[in-house]
Every structure is written in C-alpha cells, then in structure tokens.
Image: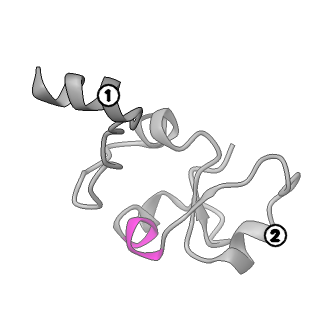
C-alpha cells in the first residue's frame, strides 16, 4: 500500500525490472514473447537485420550468449522474426 501511495503522491511509476539474464528459454517462441524481434549480440548484428529501424532486436551480449544455440543462421541475432 505504501508503494502505491508513494506512486500517487510523487507521480513516479515503479516498473518491473527486465527479466534476469539467468532466465532460461526452451525455444524461440518463449524468447519472442519478451523480445518480439529477437536478441542481437551487438549493434552491428542488429543493424544487419531486414527492416532494422522499425524491427530492431533487443541488444544484449550476455542474453544472446545464453540463447546462441537458437541462432540458426549464425548471423548474431537469435530468434529473429
């Protein structure tokens, strides 16, 4: 209740933290729920994706490393749509 009151008084919303990189994903469907355009290991890899300015993947080297086996075409972006 105090958090809600503080939010209303100060006008600051408390957003949930992003999923920890220790989360495990069994397949790309689970990844795409949180990251609809996939996960890129670098900005360079993300920019190589078709339609990059609009369809930009989430960029995280550590998250990419944990799901690298799902990068079928080995382009540096896992689970791209």
The structure's colour scheme is one colour
User: Is the C terminus in the top left, top right, bottom left or bottom right quadrant?
Assistant: top right
Q: Which mark is residue 9?
A: 1
Q: Position of residue 72 (x, y in %)?
A: 58, 60
| Mark 2 secondary-structure assignment | loop
- The stretch drawn in magenta includes residue 72: no
Badge 2 is on which residue? Answer: 48
Crowding at mark 1 (Cα within 10 Å: few <14, some 14-19, many 20+): few
Q: Quadrant of residue 14?
A: top left
SS class of the residue under badge 1? helix
Badges 2 and 1: C-beta atoms under 8 Å apart?
A: no
Measured from the top left, where is residue 77 in percent x and y? 62, 64
Residue at (40% x, 65% y) in the render: 63
Q: CA distance from mark 2 to mark 1?
A: 45 Å
Q: Up-down: is 20 above or below 4?
A: below
* 35 with respect to 13 (left or right): right
Q: Position of residue 4 (x, y in %)?
A: 22, 23
- 10 Å neighbourhood of mark 2: few (<14), some, or many (≥20)? few
Residue 30 appears at what percent x and percent y?
41, 36
Q: Earlier in the sequence, mark 2 or mark 1?
A: 1
Residue reaching furthest to the front: 9
Bounds of the magenta segment: 61-65
């Amino acid at each position: 209740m105090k958090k809600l009151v503080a939010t209303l008084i100060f006008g600051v919303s408390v957003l949930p933290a992003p999923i920890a990189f220790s989360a495990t994903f069994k397949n790309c469907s689970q990844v795409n729920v949180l990251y609809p355009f996939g996960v890129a290991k670098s900005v360079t890899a993300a920019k190589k994706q078709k339609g990059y300015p609009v369809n930009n993947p989430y960029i995280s080297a550590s998250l990419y490393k944990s799901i690298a086996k799902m990068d079928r075409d080995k382009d540096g972006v896992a689970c791209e749509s």
